[in-house]
Amino acid sequence: MMIGRGNLRPFFLLVVLLIAAFPSAAGAQQTPVKAFELAGMYQSSLNEKATGWYALSDYVVFIADLERKNRDSSVRDMRAKAMLKVSELMRSWVASQSGKVDCDLSRWPERSRRILRKYLEQKIQIPSFGMFHGHVLENSPVQHRYRYAFAAPEVELKQFCARLKRVSAEPMCVFSQVLENMLKHDNYSVAAILLFDTDLPYLAACAVQEGESEKFCMSNYSMAPNPLAQRDALRKLLEGKLEIKPENLCRIPGSYEILSAMAESSMDSSPERAFAFLGLALPASGENYAEVVRKMNSLVEGRSISSIKRNYKNGVIVKMTMNSFGNLRFGEGIPDFDDGYFKQAVELFHKHGDKNTIAEFLIKAADKTPANYKVWDYLGAILKADKKWAQAAVVYLQFLQIRPFDSEALGHLAECYSQMGRTESARVLADFLFYSGRVGDSIILKRITTQIRGQ
């Protein structure tokens, strides 16, 4: 018998209704207690319980039962106090289940330990209502009291405790979460401290320069103002005819004298700022270059990248980048659009052309469009393929000046550090990418982090 398409419709509707009416036994077993059922269970067994926590089905109920001592206390005030009390109870329950979480932060100096410990205590160890799929079971004044009851799924609370224990075993997890939070909220000053104290001085410098770029116009390669105007402003400043304030410092963005003076004033109190200013001073330091590098090395106890010699005939910008260890910053008006040299380099790259020819095109492209981050990305790839790891590291640091804290650039930098023998710095970067969740679906980052973290 043939069944028409129109006749099938009632049949399908009947099947759907039967499935909805008779769910499988497995599905019924997984169905959680619904909010109204939980509320009924609470009213029959816990609605007169004192302040504390109590088991209820698959939930833990936290009850705050506060006396309203002052008649002037509003309902809003009492609710706020009750919610704070419930938060304290949740914290106590977590402590009773997982014990005190002591994360070993001894690898960091005291100033970074304070930052990490504060974040650990305030952000990671303290549970909050929003972390759980819970239910408010009571929230009302009762005669001269105020009661607030919150039910949180026990399984989610235990998962929270398990995360706490993992944090205790992985200090780099704490570091990564704090650093990612600081970068996400543009708190570059704290990010710089953490990076500097974790032996990543060039990334710390990048954070300082990014955070203070507007305040001090941190640009050491700019078409405006022109060099003569900069020198005139500097002369007036040194003669006391120009007041030291940000709007005047903007007239001398690349001045070695000013940057080195700013560095000198920060050597003891803020070494990461001093390192950043010295890095910016390098391109225009002239005969003082060796002294600036010496000061930078003294701040990091010799952990800086050593001076790099280039054999390329052309490329003023790349030469300045190598000499400044990637501290070359570009001011407004610097071109970043694609040019003919870059297009030729990309075409050759994808055709697996001669690496030296590709490098020469990219170096010329850097002179024409220095603010184009893609130029530095391809140049880094060519240098890595040529196993020129130190040069590639500087190129990726330069990339990060244009696109601060780009995840893939950090991954490539970690790989360069690993190949250079800077295994600790490489591991820190790989751990940061892993614990901050930046790896995601990136095949490149998965390969790099797995390789480094597996060493």
Image: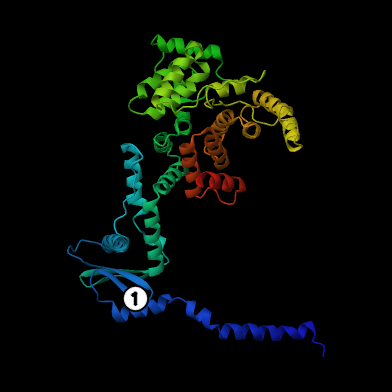
> Would you say residue 389 is visible in this rendering?
yes
Q: Is mark 1 on a helix, strand or loop?
A: strand
* Quarter of the figure with residue 270: top left
In the image, is residue 186 above or below residue 278?
A: below
User: Is 20 situated left or right of 111 in this image?
Assistant: right
Instruction: Return the residue found at the far bottom.
Output: 1
The quadrant in which the N terminus is found is bottom right
The scheme the figure's colours follow is rainbow
In the image, is residue 60 above or below residue 355?
A: below
> Would you say residue 137 is visible in this rendering?
no
Q: Which residue is drawn at 44% across and 45% down?
A: 176
In the image, is residue 362 above or below residue 57?
A: above
- Residue 433 lies, in percent from the top left, at 51, 45
* Quarter of the figure with residue 57: bottom left
Instruction: Return the residue found at the far right.
Output: 2
* Quarter of the figure with residue 363: top right
Total number of numbered discs in the rendering: 1
- Comparing 39 with 302, the one in front is 302
- Residue 83 lies, in percent from the top left, at 30, 62
- Comparing 78 with 437, the one in front is 437
Label 1 environment density (alpha carbons within 10 Å; few <14, some 14–19, many ≥20):
some
- Residue 165 lies, in percent from the top left, at 37, 57
Instruction: Return the residue found at the far left.
Output: 69
In the image, is residue 236 above or below residue 112?
A: above
Q: Disc 1 marks which residue?
A: 56
- Residue 64 lies, in percent from the top left, at 26, 67
- Comparing 181 with 63, the one in front is 181
Amino acid on which disc 1 is placed: Leu
User: Is 177 situated left or right of 24 in this image?
Assistant: left
User: Is 282 situated left or right of 85 in this image?
Assistant: right
